[in-house]
Image (cartoon, grey):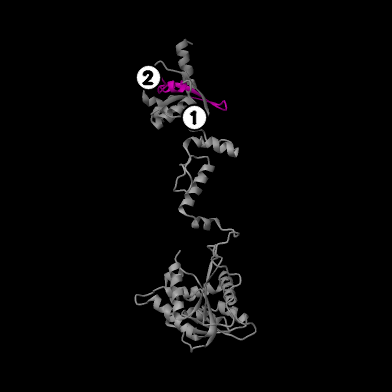
Amino acid sequence: MSRPEQLAPPEVFYNDSESYKYTTSTRVQHIQAKMTLRALELLNLEPDTPHFLLDLGCGSGLSGEILTEEGYNWLGMDISPSMLATGLDRDLEGDLFLSDLGNGIPFRPGTFDAAISISAIQWLCNADTANVDPKRRLMRFFNTLYASLKRGGKFVAQFYPMNDQQIEQIMDLAKVAGFGGGLVVDDPESKKNKKYYLVLTAGQSDRLINLAGAEMEVTDSNKKVNKKLMRKLESKKQFISRKKDVMRKRGKSVALDSKFTGRKRRPLSSLGNPLRTFFARTNLPTVYEPLPKRRNGESALEFLQKELLDKYDRVGKRRALVDSRNGLRAGDVIKVTYGDRTSVVGQVIAIKRGHNNVGTNILVRNKYQKIGVEVRVPLYNPNVKNIEIVHKPTKYMPRNKHYYIRNTKVDVGDVEQMVKQEYKKTHDY
């Protein structure tokens, strides 16, 4: 999803409809109030003392209302006429000023005791036209802001940086303008709730910035670190070791540890069977079948097919059924018995042979309530318990009679009835 500052300039993006939508959203109101109170907390102004504050990028006055509730006099600046018009309709107590922050702060030196900005200064980092230089706009903004603050005045700006380079650019230009201070990050481990606050002072102040609750970037062994953060901070060796441990716990064989993983090489004889060692250590049931023995130079596919045939057809009865010389032919009648003792009797229409008989299936046809029914019977289906030949005709019919068609003259009809008729002919009944 694109950021608002990448879609259009602020005076274009925040038109009448967008300004109304932004101002009436209860979610936006809650977030703006929370960030404004946090900015006032970082300013740490003297209580019960009148202060004149500058709200940069005030918009429709959501942050200004919080300043009024806290007892401050304030003046707001914004570039969007629609936002300021929405603020005028809401009868704000602060004064509103239409101006572009990139053109500088047009007030006399030492006018304001402090300044805040909520979700605004990241707009200065974008070039809307070819003749716009973001670096010059930021430099002009910080220079004029420094002049408009009283000596010792403080400035707190909440903003949404695009990347680390943008943060460094903003802080470097603020330092060049004469500001002192740094960056405070709330909820640094949360991707959703992370907030950046630029906290600056224009010279020495009698009352320092409130950094209560702010944490420096120092490693703490007692602090619980998020798993995602730990994975980002781990080295390549730690990543390889962690992945190997996961595969070992799953019972899989992994490559030997080497100097690249930071572990000593163990001799092959000390490893043993990794599956046996794993399940003996964890006392878990065996889920995977053991690996097959060496295939003595055979093709892996042929070896596995032979293993399957030995597993599902030890006697070789089913392989004899589909033998191309002495096996089933189209026209034979077979009976298929399943594991639940149900059976199907039908005439063989066709045999589809797979490679090495694996995947072979038999197409069987019968008639049920004057409707032709066909079913494919996999030769090595574990649910099929038995396949036996019921009838072999003395003379095989033409191929067109093996398939169900609407011409009743060549339709075979009911299989059981056909078998009975053949039985009567052979036994002279």
Q: Would residue 427 be seen by someone viewing this image from the given angle?
A: yes
Residues rendered magenta in the picture: 316-345
- Residue reaching furthest bottom? 108
The disc placed on residue 381 is 1
**Mark number for residue 201?**
none
Indicate the amino acid at tag 2: Arg
* Side of 303 relative to 70 (left or right): left
Q: Could you classify mark 1 by the number of other residues whose Cα lies within 10 Å: few (under 14), some (14-19), or many (20 or more)?
A: few
Residue 326, x across and y down, in percent: 40, 18
Is residue 363 visible to us here? no
Helix, strand or loop under label 2? loop
**Residue for point 39% across, 17% down:** 395
Q: Position of residue 265 (x, y in %)?
A: 47, 42
Q: Amino acid at mark 1?
A: Asn
Seen from the viewer's position, the closer of residues 282 and 161 is: 282
Few, some or many C-alpha atoms within 10 Å of disc 2 (few <14, some 14-19, many ≥20)?
few
Q: Is residue 219 above or below residue 35?
A: above
Q: Residue furthest top?
A: 428
On screen, residue 348 above or below 256: above
Tell me the residue that label 2 is attached to. Answer: 325
